[in-house]
Amino acid sequence: MQTFITSFKKCPLCEIEWDTREEFLKDPRVKIIGYQTNFKKLGEGFFLFNHVSCGTSLAIMIDAFHDFYKGPIYKDRATGDENCPGYCLHQSELRRCPAKCECAYVREIIQILTNWPKSKN
């Protein structure tokens, strides 16, 4: 039986590979730049990263980082509500959301990714 070892992510342009998501996140050449919402299935939205070395944008599904968040996940979506700042409607907006919305946990994961300690390479 043949086993295939797959990496967490591979840059499609320069072909650098990161074996684990932790290796990917600690790479100083990787920076989160956006969030592409999928309101029907939040976990199937994408976090967008820039691979600074070659300038390529990389998309990774939210579900790949879901376990980083340990707080509450609200049942209802507040998009368009008076308490919603509309952050999810703007791909490059990375701020934490104050609304009690089902999308708020994603914005908390963005904070974790943004503040992930980088290697000193």
Image (cartoon, grey):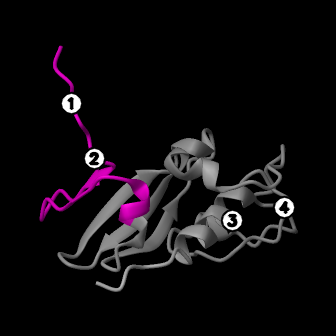
| Residue type (three-letter) at the residue carrying disc 1 | Phe
Identify the residue under disc 3: 108
| CA neighbours of label 1 inside 10 A, class few (<14), some (14 to 19), many (20+) | few
**Is 45 part of what is drawn in magenta?**
no
> Mark 3 or mark 4: which comes first in sequence?
4
How far apart are the two marked residues, 3 and 2, measured between alpha carbons? 25 Å
As rendered, which of 57 and 113 lies closer to the eye? 113
Q: Are marks 1 and 3 in contact (CB under 8 Å)?
A: no
Identify the residue under disc 4: 81
> Mark 1 or mark 3: which comes first in sequence?
1
How far apart are the two marked residues, 2 and 4, measured between alpha carbons? 40 Å
| Residue type (three-letter) at the residue carrying disc 3 | Glu
Q: Are marks 3 and 2 in contact (CB under 8 Å)?
A: no
Q: Which residues are magenta?
A: 1-24
| Residue type (three-letter) at the residue carrying disc 2 | Ser
Tag in front: 3 or 4: 3
- The answer to whether residue 26 is above or below residue 39 is below
- The answer to whether residue 36 is above or below residue 74 is below
| CA neighbours of label 3 inside 10 A, class few (<14), some (14 to 19), many (20+) | some
Q: Residue at x 86, y 60 (%)?
A: 100
Q: Secondary structure at mark 4?
A: loop
Identify the residue under disc 1: 4
How far apart are the two marked residues, 3 and 4, measured between alpha carbons? 19 Å
